[in-house]
Amino acid sequence: MPISIDTIIARLGGPDATARLTGVGTEAIRKWRQAQAIPSRHWPVIARATGLSLTDLDPASPTSPDQSSPAPGGSTTGIPMPDARPDGATAALVLADGTILWGKGFGAFTQKPALGEICFSTGMSGYQETLTDPSFAGQIITFTFPHIGNVGTTPEDDEASRIAALGLVTKEDLTEPANWRATESLDAWLKAQGVPGIAGIDTRSLTLKIRDHGAQTAALFFPENGQFDLAALQDATRAWPGLEGMDLAKTVTCKAPYTWSESVWEWSKGTRPAPENRRKVVAVDYGAKRNILRCLVAAGCDVTVVPATTTAEEILALKPAGVFLSNGPGDPAATAEYAVPAIQGVLNAGLPLFGICLGHQLLARALGGKTYKLALGHRGANQPVKDLGTGRVEITSQNHGFAVDADSLPDDAHVTHVSLFDSSNEGLASDRFPAFSVQYHPEASPGPSDSFYLFERFVALIDAHGSKD
């Protein structure tokens, strides 16, 4: 007869020793205790360490773990799942380390799991802007703020034409909208766009796991028929290759060039009028947020947006006074294969250039620098950044999992901004070309307007360059 999970963990020396032996986190051990089941892939190493037999470890004993008939809940692996599923649970979040978190699904049902990198965002507002930010492509977002859904949704707050994130994780059930601007509830909005969510998760514990052990793959599954094969979900998380080496800009960029003329929104006035004197700017769309385009217009730019794969020759043929490199998702090293030659062509033409987020990373690579994957990434609206030129500290909004290696920058480029959280690079400028960039999002205005000067700096650079021609 199988012995209890607590007895097995005690024989292994406790939760910490068990986690080290099996290569999982202590949260996974807690879930084993809660489920009173250990995933079968860990049985051999546990059997060797404890002297127990596989029969001792198999809660389905005396049936062999190689049984061909499905276990309750739909699994064909022999891992018993139904006993681990709490009453009322309709969705599951499965992590690559073996952690299984049950909750209540909302939004759209999933035929296939939402599979991508699990991350967390610390913003206390702006969930709609976050979900539609193209930089979140390939990611499932854990919101650390508990009250999600309370202001509903409105098309005015979309940062792109559709939701970019794969799914979302919340602590509390979605609240009904209580805001005069709301046109639809968050749940209905998610359903309409085919995006799932899961509520009832201990987001604090999940955030600490990501913080302490780094980002990992997760699968969010909310099946309409209520059937789960957790082993298959875990296999899927282990097989997903991760964001490194992944070019996602092509999946979120515009299909054809278009113009943008809308300025920023202003309380009681609607859209702020654009300045009469406007400079022609080409914005390369690697996953551009609409509010960045609004800020460019508000600063005095006449904006033409072009796809990510647009060449230098095609950009220069539009005869811009300056070029903007947008934010976007994925690994900059992968996007750089086609973006860097285009950027270098613009630089060599002497045009003023400004980059944000992925655009910052791509500018760094075009100048000869390198980028790397952060262990955690920066996501949220409370990130302090120091401007080294002025000594001023800005409270910034950020969303990036990669960063520029400041030590790799060439001698004719210098660091302009640094993170006060981890000292990672947050900005650079070229001493050879009229080009600069920042890692954070100045258009998001968490300060509320600490960083708008960057758009004004870009316009001033264009004007100064024009006066020299």
Image (cartoon, helix red, strand yellow):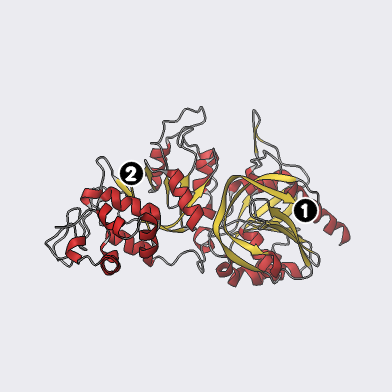
Picture coordinates of residue 151 (x, y %)? 49, 32
Picture coordinates of residue 217 (x, y %)? 42, 59
Q: Is residue 155 above or below residue 46?
A: above
Amino acid type of disc 2?
A: Gly
Label 2: how many Cα within 10 Å (few below 14, some 14–19, many 20+): many
Could you tell me which residue is drawn at 70 percent across and 38 percent down?
273
Could you tell me which residue is drawn at 48 percent across and 49 percent down?
208
Picture coordinates of residue 147 (x, y %)? 46, 35
Taking depth in this image into account, of 22 and 306 the one nearest to the observer is 22
Amino acid type of disc 1?
A: Leu
Taking depth in this image into account, of 269 and 360 the one nearest to the observer is 360
Give the side of residue 228 with respect to residue 452, left or right.
left
Q: At numbered mark 2, what does the secondary structure look like: helix, strand or loop?
A: strand
Could you tell me which residue is drawn at 65 percent across and 67 percent down?
314
Picture coordinates of residue 121 (x, y %)? 52, 47
Give the side of residue 103 with respect to residue 328, left or right.
left
Question: What residue is pinned by disc 2?
Answer: 103
Question: What residue is pinned by disc 1?
Answer: 388
User: In which image quadrant can residue 361 be found?
Assistant: bottom right
The quadrant of the image that shows the N terminus is: bottom left
